[in-house]
Image (cartoon, rainbow, N blue to C red):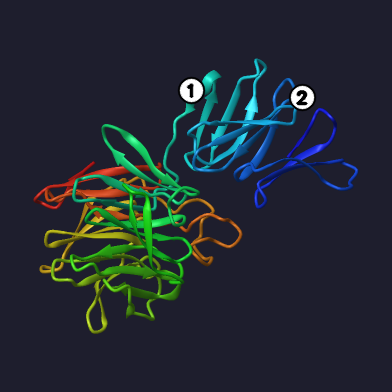
Amino acid sequence: MRFGPDGRLYYPHMMTDEVLRISPEGGEPELVVSGVPIPVAVRFDRAGELFVLSCDAAGTITHVHPETGGTSSTVTGVPGLDNAAFDGADRMFVSSFVRGSITELGERGRTRTVLPPGLNGPFGITVDPAGRVYAADHFGLSSVSESDGIDQVDVVGGTLPGLPRNVVATGDVLQLVDISGGLYAYDPVRGVSRGRAAGLGELAGIAADSSGRVVLAAPEKGQVLAVDETDSVTVLAEGLEHPVGVTLDHHGRCYVSDDRLGRVLRLDEEPVVVLDGLGAPQGIAVSGDELFVVEVEHRRLRRFGPATGTSTVAVGELAVETLPGVSGTGSNGEPDGSGRPSSFVDLAVAGDDGSLLLAANGEGSVWLLKIDAAGTGEW
């Protein structure tokens, strides 16, 4: 909301795609412009001309011409616009809540990066058969590489079915869960998705096997769920304290991390504790015959041999943490009143060489952890 040169308050209405104005003394609102996609903010430049920011995937800015009341639109390519400012030279700068970036908008659609885009978490990590790494990052889905950095695949308001909570690759298709408890099969190339299950509650870890079965951790319900190739949902385990991470070994056995009890469980006919005394274990993955789990409290990766029962620290000083102000006690993956997702640090197998991918939420990055034959690693 901003005061205009006429002394009236201008404000966007996101649900109706309109901008209105009203006297600060009250009265009836007056329509200024309609048909603006998801208007989120209004700003006036030094000449008093109105610009409307849209929080759509295209990064649309609508210029309202004062002489005619007509409009013209610019597609910036910056998704999720949320704020703007003009400097003394009338240069326009915009920020993005999706990418955490600041961009200067120049003439004829030219842009200049002031603050580079990054990752909000990330909260989920996976790699497809072609070696492409995907990060589920709440407001969007990104691909990440050492050479190209972060590339936005899609964002909320685009073709994504919802706010992505976690993701696992099954061939060329991504199995994606959102914060409302839905599971979708998402094709990142074509940008299409198919709903597989809904209303599953807050979800954290996700894993899949070669048959197409997807396994999910539902921490607030204390359950581990399975969705088969026909999209039927079954409960693999219930009555757990706070299951967050899940993984499957080569025999189809399911391992679950519980970050409140500090345990890793194997789901047999009854859950069996295989590791105890851990510091907030979350992301978990099986590489070869060994199990790896992230201890968020101690900021380290622990290696466990199920056959031998031995447990050692593989990597320390990880850039992971419980995000400030994010308790994870709310519903649908959101703490009460915060609108932010509950914290989760994911782990995934990167390739046949035993290396692992870590969603390093402590610094908004993705780490490649290389584990040697002795079970120790580096990043």
- Give left or right: position of 205 versus 160: left
**Who's the residue at 26% across and 48% down the image?**
357
Q: Secondary structure at mark 1?
A: strand
| Residue 372 x/y as whole percent | 12, 47
- Who comes first in sequence, dot 2 or dot 1? 2
Which residue is tagged 2? Answer: 67
Question: In the depicted view, which residue is nearer to us: 39 or 205?
Answer: 39
Q: Secondary structure at mark 2?
A: loop
Question: In the depicted view, which residue is nearer to us: 117 or 291?
Answer: 117
Vertical arrangement, residue 154 with respect to residue 284, above or below? above
Question: In the depicted view, which residue is nearer to us: 159 or 364?
Answer: 159
Vertical arrangement, residue 364 with respect to residue 342, above or below? above
Q: Dot 2, how many residues are within 10 Å of its Cα: few (below 14), some (14-19), or many (20+)?
A: few
Q: Report the disc number at residue 112.
A: 1
Residue flagged by tag 2: what amino acid is it?
A: Glu
Residue flagged by tag 1: what amino acid is it?
A: Arg
| Residue 301 x/y as whole percent | 26, 53
